[in-house]
Image (spheres, rainbow, N blue to C red):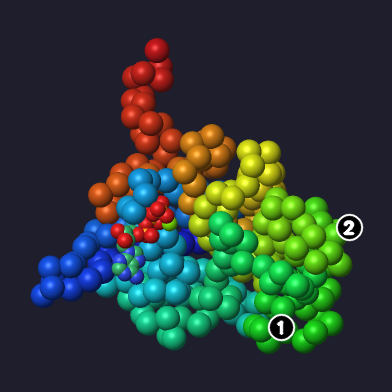
Amino acid sequence: MQLLEVKELKKGFGSKAFNTRIEVLKGINLKIQRGELVALMGPSGCGKSTLLNIIGGLLPGDDGEIELEGISSDEDSKKFNYGTKAPNKVVDVRRNGVGWIFQDFHLVEHLSAVDNVAMALEISGMDQSAAETKAKSALTTVGLGDRINFGAEQLSGGQRQRVAVARAIAGSRPLLLADEPTGNLDAESGSDIMKLFKMLTKGENPISVLMVTHDPNLASQADRMLLMKDGVVAASDIKSAWGITDEEEEE
Ligand SMILES: Nc1ncnc2c1ncn2[C@@H]1O[C@H](COP(=O)(O)OP(=O)(O)OP(=O)(O)O)[C@@H](O)[C@H]1O
Ligand SMILES: [Mg+2]
């Protein structure tokens, strides 16, 4: 089942009058299915973070459409239509559509793991005890059941990122957006995060993950890789991204 569709999305920055205008996204088209783990690659500055920010409802596109299946407050499925809407018009997308993971974790240092996760749920309106129960269960899912009362500053980089994953999945949002989630991790912790993503996308209640990475090894472990180049999606599977033709594969 399709979760996300981005159609002809365009975004530029700066002003034509001052000659500072750059067109970053020039008509992005992509689809993500429920349960898919998709890696997004492309040269620095090509617009990967810009694309994630628009999908995540943090930035409006200039033109184009986005459709996302979300969860409404009564847990029914609900479709969000946006793309060029201002961030204050897509509160629902941020609350019920997407969860975020960043390169530098964005945890509150002096709070425990469980409070870091519960706080995000409380902000979205859940009462304290329900939030704590959900937070503990999300931390158990990511393998930190024995660290719930540790302060964020007492955790390793890989453990911190797992707390961030727990925070992102605790609200039951169907799409996880991860902008270079392994960029600050050593190879082993990075690969652990990748395994965790695989588990979350293949479980009983699968979520989908769109992750930006510069690491071809990690990208090759995803279900699919999208390559961005010159403002468009230049390839949407690993073979064509590496320039391998079907004939070569048959040889
Ligand atoms: N708010 C902004 N104002 C002006 N220009 C911006 C803004 N945000 C991004 N840009 C420009 O848009 C382009 C794409 O930036 P973006 O951060 O999306 O690239 P990226 O693919 O994520 O790069 P990296 O791999 O280095 O993280 C860059 O040229 C950047 O300078
Ligand atoms: Mg970026």
Left or right: residue 229 compared with residue 213: left
**Residue at horizontal 84%, vertical 82%?**
129
Q: Label 1's element?
A: helix
Q: Residue flagged by tag 2: what amino acid is it? A: Asp
Give the residue pinned by disc 1. Answer: 122
Q: CB of residue at label 2: within 8 Å of ligand 2?
A: no
Q: Which mark is residue 146?
A: 2
Is residue 3 visible in the rendered image? The answer is yes
Is 97 above or below relative to 215? below
Give the distance between the C-alpha atoms of the residues marked 1 and 2, in whole angstroms: 22 Å
Would you say 168 lies left or right of 41 here?
right
Q: Nearer the viewer, mark 1 or mark 2?
A: 2
Q: What element carries label 2?
A: loop
| Quadrant of the rendered image containing residue 26 | bottom left
x then y, percent, for residue 12: 25, 67
Q: What residue type is labelled 1?
A: Glu
Give how far across and how far down residue 173 sits, in percent.
61, 68
Q: Earlier in the sequence, mark 1 or mark 2?
A: 1
Q: Position of residue 89 (x, y in %)?
A: 43, 85
Report x, y in % for residue 142.
76, 55
Identified at 58% across, 78% down, the residue is 95
